[in-house]
Image (spheres, rainbow, N blue to C red):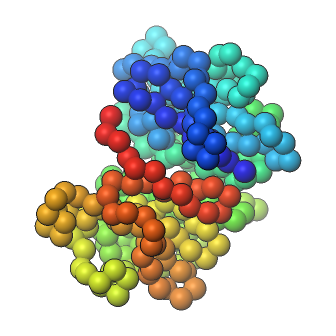
């Protein structure tokens, strides 16, 4: 059961917060590389070891050593460690590389994904690498914005945008063969039926896969909402292909987080 999430106000001090019990934990100083920092949402992943109340926070950064770049993996055992522990290094390209937020399977494995190294599997208990898989075919232009990796039950899935904001293909990784196969095609979405209006989409983000529902967030342009850009959350049923607006989340700059197969939302504050 994951109840904690990280929060770094003004990018100076990092906290771990529990919104349910309104508690926070100040984390040790981060081993930041100031010249090659990626987006914080991609760097942090929190896990809970199965059948325990032990939490670990994993952190990824890019470090320059004698002119060479490396992805460096750190771990912090919450309530135990007073500093971050380095557990792994992988060579990073000097040119641009795309990395995605690591995915935790709810068991013992964390999946770190990049265009250079593919899918690297980490054992969160032993804190070692235990596997590696290739990536499915990805768009040559801006793969980060057009590709999303989601965890579905016990499967790793990849959603690729075929026509921007309109049609998508979903592939699933077979862990035994190491091959990806096409699972589903979706879109265009009927937003008029779902929320009563056409949307001029600024961006569309797939966030979670819960049972047969894919949760995604749409940011619509100010032409639809004159007071500014607003986000609306929807769910897509892969069995019925129906899109449904998620009620109870105010339109605004909100984000949803997963909590034991349920959703709660927090307003996003600019940093």
Give above or below for 209 relative to 113. Answer: below
Can see residue 179?
no
Query: Which is more toward the observer, 241 or 120?
Result: 241
Question: From the image, which quarter does the C terminus lie in?
Answer: top left
Residue 44 on image: x %, y %: 55, 36
Q: Position of residue 231 (x, y in %)?
A: 33, 61
201 vs 17, left or right, is left
Q: Is residue 6 visible?
A: yes
Q: Does 89 appear above or below 222?
A: above
Residue 169 as seen in the image, left or right of residue 49: left
- The x and y percentages for residue 18 are 60, 40
* Quarter assignment of residue 220: bottom left
Image x and y of residue 9, in percent: 41, 29
Measuring 36% from the left and 37% from the top, which residue is drawn there?
96
Q: Residue at x 72, y 20 (%)?
A: 81
Question: Which of the 4 quarters of the picture holds residue 251?
Answer: bottom left
Farthest right residue? 51
In the depicted structure, whether residue 100 falls above or below residue 194: above
The mark total stands at 0
């Amino acid at each position: 059961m994951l109840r904690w999430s990280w929060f770094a106000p003004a990018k100076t001090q990092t906290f771990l917060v529990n919104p349910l019990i309104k508690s926070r934990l100040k984390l040790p100083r981060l081993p930041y590389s100031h010249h090659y920092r990626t987006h914080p949402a991609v760097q942090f992943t929190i896990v809970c070891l199965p059948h325990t109340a032990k939490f670990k926070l994993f952190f990824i950064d890019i470090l320059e050593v004698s002119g060479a770049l490396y992805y460096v993996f750190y771990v912090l055992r919450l309530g135990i460690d007073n500093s971050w522990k380095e557990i792994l290094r992988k060579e990073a390209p000097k040119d641009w590389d795309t990395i995605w937020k690591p995915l935790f399977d709810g068991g013992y494995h964390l999946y770190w994904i990049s265009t250079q190294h593919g899918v690297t599997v980490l054992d969160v208990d032993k804190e070692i690498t235990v596997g590696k898989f290739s990536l499915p075919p990805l768009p040559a232009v801006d793969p980060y914005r057009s590709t999303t990796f989601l965890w579905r039950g016990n499967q790793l899935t990849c959603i690729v945008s075929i026509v921007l904001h309109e049609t998508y293909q979903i592939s699933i990784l077979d862990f035994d063969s190491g091959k990806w196969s096409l699972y589903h095609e979706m879109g265009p979405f009927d937003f008029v039926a779902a929320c009563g209006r056409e949307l001029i989409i600024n961006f569309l983000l797939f966030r979670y896969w819960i049972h047969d529902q894919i949760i995604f967030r749409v940011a619509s342009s100010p032409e639809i909402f004159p007071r500014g850009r607003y986000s609306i959350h929807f769910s897509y049923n892969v069995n019925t292909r129906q899109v449904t607006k998620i009620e109870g989340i105010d339109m605004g700059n909100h984000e949803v987080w997963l909590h034991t197969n349920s959703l709660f939302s927090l307003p996003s504050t600019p940093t």
